[in-house]
């Protein structure tokens, strides 16, 4: 009995967390850590206040709890090293998550934030600005500040704040622009978590603006074929010599709109005319590419229309419809091939696609001819049935008259 | 109402009804409205032994393409052959043992999961079963 009381008292004593006991009696910012820490990933792994802040949580008396090991709230200038004391220790981190990287601090020092931080600018982002303090979640948790669909807002807390960013001489409209982009649409509307957010292009712990020469490599991560085609094109050398950022020159950076065929050629919205003069050869090539593409699209649409009409009229057209998917594949391929700017290659691929479209168009026309034949046959048959019915009616009348006379 | 009038009305009404019933399907055929495409859920994609290991076949599943792959281990797997990026028809790349979208180099593994490139979602996978000499592919419930 005595032993049981001793053990239970000892267990209670060992589990005591006087930090929580005191702070939950407090208000506002002194209470907040208690509430948010319940959801914190560190708490879920069994860590407690003293693991970061030091002290002795088993002591009820505040003065005794804040013993010589007590660190309290780290200064902003101490935060990177404060977090790294565990997160850069591979043998320590291995106990909790062997796959988690332990080089965040080393990478941080290479980032724009880290570089400025080293120059005593403590206004730049440190660990807690992106991860939070007591409510830190794993990056895979949808409520984490570093979960893909939360990252743009996490970054924009500072980067969209004109007052805060004053002095850094960089734009503050990235978030506004990103919101209109095809990437934001994929992320927020389609919930596509593979869509790039700030850190996919700028890095996370090593965040820096990609340089002019490396932008294509960044885009290349998700758009490898467009990147390869561009790199093999004559534009690559010209862009490099002129210091033009590759993909960005035509597609923009944060506000990357869905690409459209209007970007090609020499029309009002064409990007080619940004550099090429009307009399130049490249201008003529751009015009020709657009012309060929438009013709190809028109032919596909015509074939589609024929098949749809035939289908609606009850003719079986699943086979040509299936074939048409190959023509659509060719069209998408050609659109990507425009990054090569090679009229010859584009024309070759369009020709391949057009052969399919010709077959499909013929099948569609045959199907419509068949539908017309069926309709005509039905109309003629119906007319004959009506005539027969009228003739029968008249005959019966005639027989009736004869019988009555 | 007299009995004779009633019979006349009855006969007249029946005649009009019969004419409408006769003309309606004819008019519907001549002036059709848009129909929804019949959904095909099951199809014979190939014959047993038609595909050697590490080979594939694009087959017609309704009006859409499907792909049947005999993996290097001899396991049959089938997916929608429509890339989840921009709907190009994908192909099986036997030297890498992966599925490739030739339009933008999107790559999928043999479970249909995205390996690299722009596709935002895995390929739709189908059930494969063998019935006699036929390889039957069906949509998952």
Image (tube, rainbow, N blue to C red):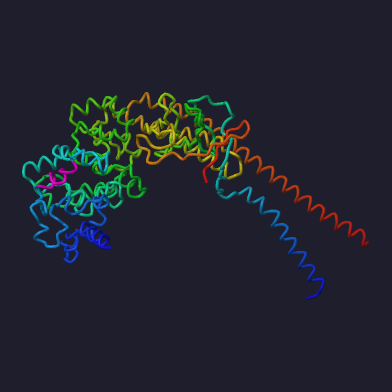
A170, above or below A361, in the image: below
Q: Is residue A45 left or right of residue A170?
A: right
Q: Is residue A83 magenta?
A: yes
Q: Is residue B37 left or right of residue A177?
A: right
- Between residue A138 and residue A321, name the one nearer to us: A138
Q: Position of residue A338 (x, y in %)?
A: 34, 31
Q: Position of residue A292 (x, y in %)?
A: 40, 31
The residue shown at (65%, 40%) is A373
Q: Start and end of the magenta stretch?
A: A78-87
Total numbered labels placed on residues in the image: 0
The quadrant the N terminus of chain A occupies is bottom left
A281, above or below A29, in the image: above
The quadrant the C terminus of chain A occupies is bottom right
- Between residue A246 and residue A261, name the one nearer to us: A246
Q: Is residue B115 left or right of residue A138?
A: right
Residue A209's quadrant in the figure? top left
Q: Is residue B70 magenta?
A: no
The residue shown at (37%, 23%) is A344
The residue shown at (11%, 61%) is A62
Q: Position of residue B67 (x, y in %)?
A: 50, 33
- Between residue B71 and residue A89, name the one nearer to us: A89
Q: Main secondary structure of the magenta part?
A: helix
Q: Is residue A171 left or right of residue B118?
A: left
């Amino acid at each position: 009995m005595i032993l049981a009381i001793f053990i239970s008292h000892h267990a209670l004593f060992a589990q005591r967390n006087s930090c929580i006991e005191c702070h939950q009696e407090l208000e506002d910012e002194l209470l907040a850590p208690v509430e948010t820490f319940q959801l914190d990933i560190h708490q879920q792994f069994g860590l407690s206040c003293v693991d970061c802040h030091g002290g002795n949580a088993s002591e009820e008396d505040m003065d005794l709890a804040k013993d010589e090991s007590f660190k309290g709230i780290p200064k902003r200038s101490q935060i990177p090293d404060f977090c790294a004391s565990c997160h850069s220790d591979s043998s320590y981190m291995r106990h909790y998550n062997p796959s988690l990287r332990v080089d965040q601090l080393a990478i941080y020092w290479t980032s724009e934030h880290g570089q400025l931080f080293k120059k005593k600018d403590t206004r730049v982002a440190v660990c807690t600005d992106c991860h939070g303090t007591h409510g830190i979640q794993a990056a895979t948790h949808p409520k984490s500040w570093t979960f893909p669909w939360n990252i743009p807002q996490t970054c924009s807390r500072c980067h969209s704040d004109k007052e805060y960013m004053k002095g850094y001489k960089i734009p503050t409209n990235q978030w506004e622009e990103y919101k209109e982009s095809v990437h934001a649409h994929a992320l927020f509307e389609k919930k596509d978590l593979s869509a790039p957010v700030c850190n996919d292009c700028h890095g996370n712990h090593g965040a820096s603006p990609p340089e002019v020469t490396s932008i294509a490599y960044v885009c290349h991560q998700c758009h490898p074929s467009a990147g390869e085609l561009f790199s093999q094109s004559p534009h690559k050398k010209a862009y490099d010599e002129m210091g033009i950022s590759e993909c960005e020159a035509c597609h923009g950076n944060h506000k990357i709109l869905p690409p459209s065929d209007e970007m090609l050629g020499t029309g009002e919205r064409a990007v080619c005319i940004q550099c090429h003069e009307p009399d130049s050869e490249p201008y003529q090539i751009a015009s020709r590419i657009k012309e060929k593409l438009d013709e190809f699209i028109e032919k596909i649409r015509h074939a589609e229309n024929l098949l749809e009409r035939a289908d609606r009229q009850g003719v079986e057209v699943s086979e040509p419809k299936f074939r048409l998917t190959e023509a659509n594949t060719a069209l998408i391929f050609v659109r990507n091939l425009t990054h090569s700017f090679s009229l010859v290659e584009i024309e070759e691929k369009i020709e391949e696609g057009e052969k399919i479209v010709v077959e499909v168009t013929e099948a569609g026309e045959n199907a419509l001819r068949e539908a017309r034949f069926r309709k005509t046959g039905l109309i003629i048959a119906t007319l004959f049935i009506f005539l027969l019915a009228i003739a029968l009616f008249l005959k019966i009348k005639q027989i009736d008259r004869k019988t009555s006379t | 109402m007299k009995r004779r009038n009633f019979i006349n009305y009855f006969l007249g009404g029946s005649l009009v009804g019969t004419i409408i019933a006769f003309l309606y399907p004819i008019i519907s055929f001549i002036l059709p409205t848009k129909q929804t495409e019949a959904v095909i859920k099951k199809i014979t994609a190939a014959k047993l032994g038609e595909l050697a290991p590490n080979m594939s076949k694009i087959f017609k599943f309704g009006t859409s393409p499907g792909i049947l792959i005999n993996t290097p281990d001899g396991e049959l797997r089938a997916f929608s052959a429509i890339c989840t990026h921009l709907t190009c028809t994908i192909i099986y790349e036997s030297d890498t043992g992966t599925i490739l979208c030739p339009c933008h180099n999107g790559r999928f593994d043999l479970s249909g999961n995205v390996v690299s490139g722009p596709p935002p979602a895995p390929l739709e996978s189908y059930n494969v079963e063998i019935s006699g000499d036929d390889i039957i592919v069906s949509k998952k419930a």
